[in-house]
Amino acid sequence: MIGQFIRDKFIYLHPGYTVLNTVAFGIILGLAVILIIKMFRYLKKDPKDLVIPLIPFIFFGSSTRALVDNGIYPLTYALVTPGIYFLTGFAAIATLLSAVFIEKKTGFDYKYTIFAVGAVMCVPSIFYAGPINWTAFFQVLGMWALISSFFVVLRNKWSLIHDRFNLSVLMAHIFDASSTFVAVDFYGYGEQHVVPTALTSLTGTAFVMYPLKIIVILSALYVVDLYVEDRTVKNMLKLAIFILGLAPGLRNFLSLSMGTF
């Protein structure tokens, strides 16, 4: 009975989130972040340095999920939520530990090793990607560029986003908002997460994702910068927020570009 409950509520083979599994996944994420912070302290590495090296891993997880959406990969527990996140996370952590070990033995920068391994993992996803819906592709990128440009222009006048890391975190979430807005408003798809679903239903448009994302992310970055003094904790929190924006944004973008959301 317990196993069936877990499969139905948490390890599901259908889209959508509930208040219950959203809270549960949030708690799991929080615990994972705490453990990863301890790992970075032990390794004496700065999470901020992994923003670029981890992008291939994020692409791997998001593209794999998009290929499942399009029926190219099988619908299995390992390739849907939360399986794909565990798979990608374990692969990234194992690669990080191996890369640091290689760096100690050879002097080869661990960041290059991480990026290279992630890039190799992405090859099958690129190979199996079908015909691209270029209209949707450029609609998402166009909206992302349009909204992001406002903050890029303000960067030198606003200390909060003058920091390149903060700006990257914000732009990742603007990308997520853009993929959702285009998919829902132009292609008739539906939002899966609890709060965005409620706000989209209330306003009648997924454009509400932009002010929602911008307000929440800028507030989070402000609080982290103001109250978190430990550099490792601060940068790990920002890295986690970055991933939480880019991963679903890429999944939506790739699914939509290949014809499904």
Image: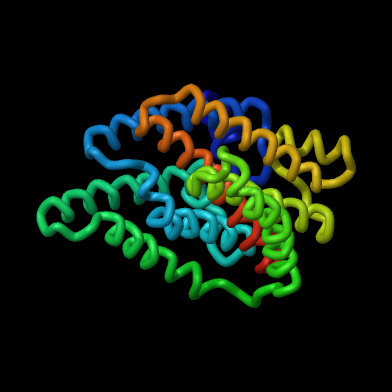
Q: Nearer the viewer, residue 211 or 87?
A: 211
Expressed as whole percent of the image width and height from the top left, the position of residue 8 reads 60, 34
Q: State the image quarter where residue 236 is shown.
A: top left
> Could you tell whether 123 is left or right of 73 in the image?
left
Report the number of numbered marks: 0
Expressed as whole percent of the image width and height from the top left, the position of residue 113 reads 27, 60
| Image quadrant in which the C terminus is located | bottom right
> Could you tell whether 144 is left or right of 229 in the image?
right
Expressed as whole percent of the image width and height from the top left, the position of residue 185 reads 83, 54
Instruction: Name which residue lies at 85% across and 38% down.
Output: 201
Instruction: Name which residue lies at 42% across and 32% down.
Output: 234
| Image quadrant in which the N terminus is located | top right
Expressed as whole percent of the image width and height from the top left, the position of residue 135 reads 75, 72
Q: State the image quarter where residue 203 is shown.
A: top right
Q: State the image quarter where residue 183 is shown.
A: bottom right
Q: Nearer the viewer, residue 141 or 16?
A: 141
> Could you tell whether 226 is left or right of 33 in the image?
right
Instruction: Name which residue lies at 45% across and 56% down.
Output: 55
Q: Farthest residue toward the front? A: 157
Instruction: Name which residue lies at 53% across and 50% down.
Output: 168
